[in-house]
Amino acid sequence: MQKNHSVFRVESLKFLVSDLAALFQAQLNEFRVISTPIEVRIQTDSRQIQPGDIFIAIAGEKQNGHQFIPKAIQQGAIGVIAEKSDPAHHAAFEIIVPSTTQALLTAAQKALRKTNCKQIGITGSAGKTTMKEMLSAVLGASYLVANTTGNYNTPIGVPLSILAMNPDADFFVTELSASYPGEIDQNLSYLTLSDAIISSIGSSHLEFFHTVDKVLKEKMKISQAIVETGTLLLPGDNPAILSLPREKQFVYYGLNPSNDLRANHLEYRTNGIHFDAELPGESIPNLSLSAFGNHMVLNSLPVLFLARKYGIPVHSIREVLAGFAAPAGRGRLIHYKEGYCIIDETYNANPVSFKAALQAFDKTPFPRKILVFSDMLELGEGSATLHQRLADEIAAYTFHTVLYYGDYNHIMEPVLKKPDSHYQNFPSLEAMEQFLLQTAQPGDGILIKASNGKHLSEMIRHLESHAC
């Protein structure tokens, strides 16, 4: 039966969450029963549309979602939110707004206000997603927790996560991207954060910010959205952070004794890392993570502080952390039936995260260590200089084998090709993967690290067919 086509022109989507089901009850009933309006699924990606979804066409810099409206309807979308009407769309309804991006933000703002959840925001140059997942898991021991999906940390991704969240959630843990000037502002315009975390400050996104000081200034905007009684947790081992005037909301975490939250007695093992933690007025011994590196320990310190602030018992924290699996590409340990272990660091690479990974890899007691790496992206005009520094840092360690694929072999090879460490450059990922499979031996530790855009994660997926 052909559905009637309705067009509604509105100035925003402020009615969307509360009134959409009532407005289109007849059409929606043909697909599913919606018990609460907040359950309406809104998608920006036509490839993810399921029957009964609503497609919102976002006009981005690279692609305009309006061109994918026919595909979304073909996939089963019953409604379209767009900036212009087209009767040929044949959806049950269209909602026409001046700006779909602003409409999405307005809808998310209203949806969030309908909840009573505490909001916790996380931004930084590296570690945001891992920290978000770890905090969500630990708080989840006692509370109902919603968070941003995957790496949905943009002015589009965060509202979509809000519209999909359970309205009864006690906490909403949101990752916030600040990869170019002004990106974080849109999300902060409607968030009211109980607490916030800056995971790190480093030489990421210099293509847009040019200096680390400007990166810090952008990330520090998160402090403006925190309630007066809230806390901003800052990485206190970072010189850029220490240059800031101290505020009463600030709590510093790190490995140095001067921090408010500290990790000590770190013990590196091939199956993870063990440590003790010092919090204000409390010591928490015998903590462990089935993940890789000091940066994972640093990620856990703000999590420990907030977990205790909100009453999570120590035994629950210890249990959740011990079972916490690092997200793909972010320090995940993969043990293979051939007896070697791959450390998957393929999602993010910048000078700060690379240095931390090299230090941790050096301390992990594998009989042989193989470094597989590619380039750091979005470093701007200083990219060649930063890759030269990376080559010098790698050369300071003694790895059994160093394998490289990327655009800077002219920098890497003169520094890394030395008698006590086999260095080899590869023209393709496939060639590097085949060489690695032929070279790896039982007991080996293999660190694979690069920016996501270099696609070393594809090699990880191929290799996972050999995992235990």
Image: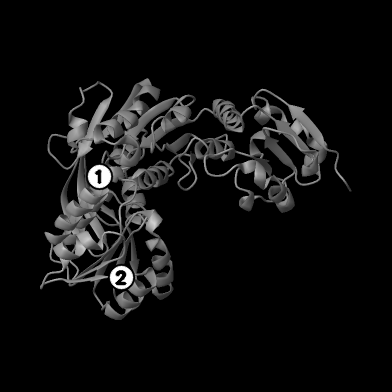
**Residue 329 visible in image:** yes
- Secondary structure beneath dot 1 equals helix
| Relative to 335, residue 57 above or below | above
At x 41% / y 41%, what residue is drawn? 139
- Is residue 93 shown left or right of residue 201? right
- Judge whether residue 294 can be spotted in this image: no
The image shows residue 205 at horizontal and vertical percentages of 33, 41
Q: Position of residue 11 (x, y in %)?
A: 67, 22
Q: Which mark is residue 426?
A: 2
Identify the element where label 2 is drawn.
loop
Tell me the quadrant of the picture where the C terminus can be found: bottom left
In the figure, residue 79 lies in which quadrant?
top right
Q: Is residue 15 left or right of residue 87?
A: left
- Rendered view: 15 above or below 36: above
Disc sitting over residue 382 in the figure: 1
Picture coordinates of residue 440, whole percent (x, y): 27, 77
* Residue 179, quarter of the rendered image: top left
Q: Which amino acid type corresponds to the residue marked 2 in the rendered image?
A: Phe
